[in-house]
Amino acid sequence: MQPLAMAPRLLLLLAFLRLGTTGPLVQGRGFRSPTVAWPSFFNFNQSQGVQETIQIPNNGSAPLLVDVQVFVSNVFNVDILRYTVSSMLLLRLSWVDTRLAWNASLYPQHAVTLPWDSLWTPGLTIQEALWVDWQDQSPRARVGPDGHVDLYLALTTETNCDFELLHFPRDQSDCNLSFYALSNTVLELEFRAHAVNEIVSVKREYVVWGLETQIPPRQLVPCFQVTLRLQNTALKAIIALLVPGEALLLADMCGGLLPLRATERIAYKVTLLLGYLVFHSSLVQALPSSSSCNPLLIYYFTVLLLLLFISTMETVLLAALQARGHLRARSSPIPNPRGEQQDHGDLGPHPEEAPGMKESRSWAEAADHIFFLVYVVGVVCSQFFFIGFWMWATCKSDPAPGEAIPHGGQPRL
C-alpha cells in the first residue's frame, strides 16, 4: 500500500516543478519503486527546496567556476560616426551544480534538459550595450549525471566602441564587450572565458583580425571581457575621398600652365576652388570627429583647401596687377625718338605696344612662373611629408571621465 500512497505526492511534486505529469524527466528502468535514489532536484518535501535550486551552488570556500566560450559569428554595421558596432554572439556557459546530480547506475540517462528558470543561471549584463536581443527567450539547460550544466545563449547586440581613427582609413580599433554578473560577488562566482572566431564572411568594410578575452582585475562583481580587433579595409574611403582630392590638386597644378593673360585661367581656378569647397563640406560630414586624436585626413584636406586658395589668389592678384599696368601704359603718351616725325595717319591693325605695357607683362609673367615652380615643389614635398607623418604619428586619447576623475569610474576593490 505504500507505493499507492506515495503516488499522489509524486504527481503533485512534478506539477510544482513544471515538469509535466505525462512522464518522468529522467526516464529509465526501476522508476516503479518510489524508494530508489532520485535526482537531487526531485528530493524536495516543500516549496522551499525549489527555491534553494535558484540560489548559486555552494562550492565550499572557493567561488563557483563558470567556463564561458564566446563564439563570434558576425560583426556588422560598424558606424564610426556614432561610435557603435553590432555583433552576433553565442555564449556557452558551463558549471557544476551538485544538487542536480543523480545516480547514473540507477538512471543511465546521459543528460536531461531543464528550463533555464528552474535552476540557477548567471545573469549577464553587457556594460557597453545600447540594446541586446536574446534570440531564445526561453533557453533550456543541459544537465549531466554529475551535475554538469551547459547553457547556450544566442544574442545580437549593438555596443559602443572607442574607435582609434587617427590613421583613418587604415585604422585599427579594439572594441570591448564587458559581461558582468551583477547579482553575485567575486567571492561567490568566477569566470573563465575563451573566444572563438567563427566569422566566415570577409565582405565587410571592417574585418575582425583578432579576438581576445580577459578577466579585469580588482572588480567587485564577477566579469569577463571580450575584445574585438577591427581593421578597416580602406577601399571605400580611398575611392571616395583620396582620389577626388588628389585629382583636384593635380588639376590645379595643370592650370598653372595656362598663360596669365588668358581670361580662362581665372575662371578655371575659381571653378576648381568652388568645386573643392563643395567636396570639403561633404567630406566634413563623412569623417568622424572626436574630442582627441581626430583623423589625419581632416588636416590633410584642410591643407589642400589652403593650397587651392593660395593658387587661386595668386592668379587673381597677378592678373589684376597686369591689367592695371596695361591701363596705366595706355593712358600715358608714347614717346617718339628724336628726329622721327609722328605719323598721325592710320596705325594699322597691329600697333606697337608701349614699353610700360611690355615691362608690366614681363614682370607679371616672371613672377607667375616662379610661383608655379615653388607651388609644384611645395605640393610634392607636402605629399611626402604627409606620408611620413602618417606612418610615424601617434596619438594617445584622453582618459575617460570615469578614469580621469579621482572619485569616479567603476567600483573596484
Image (cartoon, grey):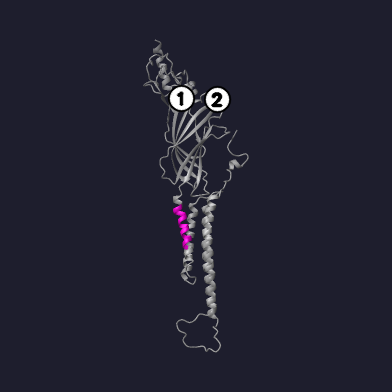
Q: Specify few, some or many for label 2: CA neighbours under 10 Å numbering under 14, 14-19, or 20 or more.
A: few
> Which corner quadrant holds the C terminus?
top right
Query: Which numbered marker is on residue 148?
Result: 1
Query: Which numbered marker is on residue 298?
Result: none
The magenta stretch is 238-251
**Residue 410 seen in this snapshot:** yes
x 51%, y 31%: residue: 192
Please state which amino acid type lies under the numbered disc 2: Ala
Please state which amino acid type lies under the numbered disc 1: His
Q: In the current view of this chain or complex, which residue is farthest to the right?
A: 406
Q: Is residue 2 above or below residue 229?
A: above
Q: Secondary structure at mark 1?
A: strand
Q: Is residue 347 above or below residue 318?
A: below
Image coords of residue 371 (percent x, y): 54, 66
Q: Is residue 348 above or below residue 285?
A: below
**Residue 294 seen in this snapshot:** no
x 47%, y 64%: residue: 254
